[in-house]
């Protein structure tokens, strides 16, 4: 279950980052990029806890 959740976080994070490249406004671009990065690193943290 934990592995499925982390893979899902990776995919969603990458998808949000990909969508941010198509954003016209800079504010939206940086907001989506930040959210995508947070989800991406949350996925890494779920796979490799301290």
Image (tube, grey):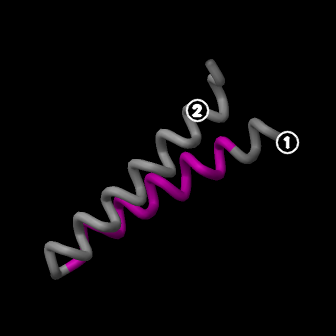
Residue 25 highlighted magenta (yes or no):
no
- Where, by quadrant of the figure, is residue 12 drawn? bottom right
20 displayed left or right of 45: left
Residue farthest to the top?
A: 50
State whether the magenta stretch is mostly helix, strand or loop.
Answer: helix
Q: Is residue 14 above or below residue 19?
A: above
Earlier in the chain: of badge 2 and badge 1, it is: 1
Residue at 60 percent across and 50 percent down: it is 9
Tag 1 secondary structure: loop
Residue 42 higher or lower than 16, as above or below: above
- Per the model, the C-alpha gap separating discs 2 and 1 is 15 Å
Is residue 11 left or right of 17 when viewed as pictured? Answer: right
- The percent coordinates of residue 50 (x first, y second) are 62, 18
Above or below, 37 against 49 in this view is below
Which segment did they paint magenta? 6-23
On the image, numbered disc 1 is attached to which residue?
Answer: 1
Q: Which residue is mark 2?
A: 45
């Amino acid at each position: 279950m934990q592995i499925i959740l982390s893979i899902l976080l990776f995919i969603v994070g990458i998808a949000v980052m990909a969508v941010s490249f198509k954003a016209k406004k800079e504010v939206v671009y940086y907001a989506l990029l930040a959210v995508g990065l947070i989800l991406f690193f949350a996925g890494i943290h779920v796979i490799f806890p301290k």
